[in-house]
């Protein structure tokens, strides 16, 4: 029968394995995200990858509740983080723990590659759906010419309408000038009274 690892030995092994895969694991960090707060045994904040070895020895089951665990699992499914969580309920040897950790890291890397590939395909499809630069330039030139011609036609129509209105308004008001002048002169002279 294989010997069961303590939390201390298990975390040392996991830290070595994760670091060997290129992760900058910091030990015994406080994790505060998604409304979850607990002491994580190992965490790389840049890569958002870590591990937690749950034991009754450190009262980890009280530190990370079932609801918080589910919240972390949801974030992991969305690809926002990767957390390797081991529970002491199933006794593990060093060999078994190393095998599970390698499997987790392999799956995580495959999922990350799939996300990158999917993002690249989406970007390529979006780029392929766009018109080419030359066609776009030609379209803009045609639209520009059409809009200039229609603007010129509209300006001519408007100027014709305005000039017709201006002509109508500019018609002189015809008053008999002589009669108005005679009345003005008559009112300015004093009247003679007969003696």
Image (cartoon, rainbow, N blue to C red):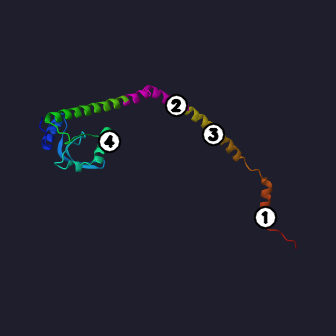
Instruction: Provide the residue designation for mark 4.
Output: 74
- Residue at mark 3 to residue at mark 4: CA–CA distance: 64 Å
The one of 149 and 8 positioned closer to us in this rendering: 8
Question: Which one is in front, 129 or 148?
Answer: 129
Q: Is residue 127 left or right of residue 164?
A: left
* Residue carrying label 2: 143
Residue 163 lies in the magenta-colored region: no
Helix, strand or loop at mark 3:
helix
Q: Nearer the viewer, mark 3 or mark 4?
A: 4
Q: Residue at x 44, y 26 (%)?
A: 134
Dot in front, 4 or 2:
4
Q: Quadrant of residue 148?
A: top right
- Which label was assigned to residue 187? 1
Taking depth in this image into account, of 162 and 57 the one nearest to the observer is 57
What is the CA distance from the residue labelled 3 to the residue labelled 1? Answer: 48 Å
Q: Nearer the viewer, mark 1 or mark 2?
A: 2
């Amino acid at each position: 029968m294989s010997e069961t690892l303590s939390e201390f030995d298990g975390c040392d092994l996991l830290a070595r394995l994760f670091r060997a895969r290129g992760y900058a694991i910091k030990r015994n960090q406080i994790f505060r995200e998604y409304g979850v707060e607990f002491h994580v045994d190992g965490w790389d904040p840049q890569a958002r990858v870590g591990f937690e070895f749950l034991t009754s020895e450190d009262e980890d089951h009280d530190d990370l509740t079932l609801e918080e665990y589910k919240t972390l699992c949801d974030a992991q499914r969305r690809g926002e983080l990767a957390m390797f969580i081991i529970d002491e309920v199933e006794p593990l040897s060093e060999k078994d723990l190393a095998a599970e950790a390698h499997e987790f890291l392999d799956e995580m890397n495959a999922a990350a590659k799939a996300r990158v590939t999917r993002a690249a395909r989406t970007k390529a499809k979006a780029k392929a759906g766009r018109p080419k630069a030359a066609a776009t330039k030609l379209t803009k030139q045609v639209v520009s010419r059409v809009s200039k011609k229609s603007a010129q036609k509209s300006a001519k129509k408007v100027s014709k309408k305005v000039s017709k209105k201006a002509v109508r308004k500019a018609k002189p008001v015809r008053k008999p000038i002589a009669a108005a002048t005679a009345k003005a002169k008559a009112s300015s002279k004093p009247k003679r009274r007969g003696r």
